[in-house]
Image (cartoon, rainbow, N blue to C red):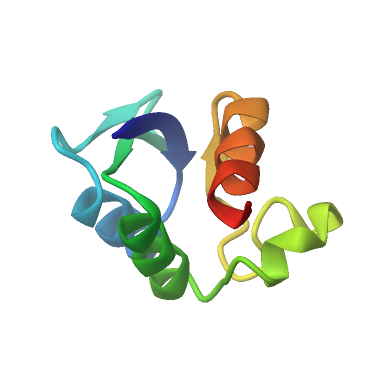
Amino acid sequence: MITLLAYCTDLKTLKICEKYSNEGFELQNGDEYIGDLNFKGKEDFENFLNDIGESFESLQDWDRYPFSKFPDLEFAIEDDFWNYVEEMVN
């Protein structure tokens, strides 16, 4: 399992993120939600990508970050996110 710290600011993204969070997300600074996304493996991560309208293929274009359909979704440590993507693709 991998855990990635993420931030979001809208309720639609929050709902998706909480689906993949063991402990949920908390409101921080009055306008931003923060929490851990927990992925058990490739299938779980693929489901997350599908939920936010992305795919492994679309992530190959690294310039698209943050996600075009969910621009308010950010990862605390981008390198951890991209390393995980690379691991899942290879």
Q: Position of residue 80 (x, y in %)?
A: 58, 28
Question: Residue visible at 56% across and 51% down?
Answer: 72
In this rendering, the answer to whether 48 lies above or below 76 is below
Q: Quadrant of residue 32?
A: top left
Which residue is most to the left?
A: 23
Q: How many marks?
A: 0
Where's the N terminus, which quadrant?
top left
55 on left or right of 16: right
Tell me the quarter of the picture where residue 6 sits.
top left
Q: In which image quadrant can residue 28 be found? A: top left
Where residue 90 appears, as percent x and y from the top left, is 63, 51
Task: Name the residue at 61% across, 66% down.
Answer: 56
In terms of depth relative to the viewer, which is nearer, 42 or 51?
42
Most foreground residue, 76 or 10: 76
36 left or right of 29?
left
* Residue at the spot 40% in from the left edge and 23% down from the top edge: 29
Residue 65: percent from the left, percent from the top? 73, 52
Q: Residue at x 46, y 37 (%)?
A: 7
Residue farthest front in this picture: 90
